[in-house]
Amino acid sequence: MLPETLSEWFSWAGLVLPLFAITISLCVLAWSALRYVKIESKKLQLQRFENFQMLIEIVNNVDEQGGLYPQLAAAYELRNFPEYGEILQRMYERHMRALPGFERVAEEINATIAFLKK
């Protein structure tokens, strides 16, 4: 059932070529959307890591410039980063023994680690 005359070929091409162009356009659009999502995901991952580092700095603020309550809040907020639970556990198992006088912060860190182990 191929076109036989020139006018049938033109009719067939007038139908098939726009469908082909639409298909190619949709594929390019889908590829661009996937690429955008991947880039935004990487940006979000980097932002989460920067937030995690900021919280670690607050918790480790041993000279108490900010006070005890920001340290406790930061230790609690670390629960929102389960992907770093293993490293948190290793860091603070060693670190909290070396910080006498910070029992409340150590308790909150231990509670956070217990929460992340669930």
Image: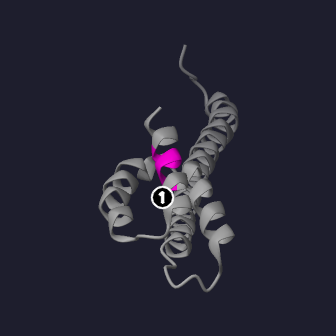
Left or right of 67, for residue 107 = left
Q: Position of residue 64 (x, y in %)?
A: 58, 82
Residue in view at x 37 percent, y 59 percent: 92
| Residue at image location 52% in from the left, 45% down from the top | 111
Q: Position of residue 45 (x, y in %)?
A: 52, 59
**Secondary structure under badge 1?**
helix
Of helix, strand and loop, which mostly describes the magenta segment? helix
Q: Residue at x 59, y 52 (%)?
A: 37
Q: What segment is highlighted magenta in the picture? A: 109-113
Camera-nearest residue between 34 and 89: 89
| Amino acid type, label 1 | Ala
- Which quadrant is home to the N terminus? top right
Q: In which quadrant of the rendered view does residue 8 lie?
A: top right
The answer to whether residue 112 is magenta is: yes
* Residue 95 magenta-highlighted: no
47 vs 114, left or right, is right
Left or right: residue 67 compared with residue 39: right
103 w.r.t. 53: above or below: above
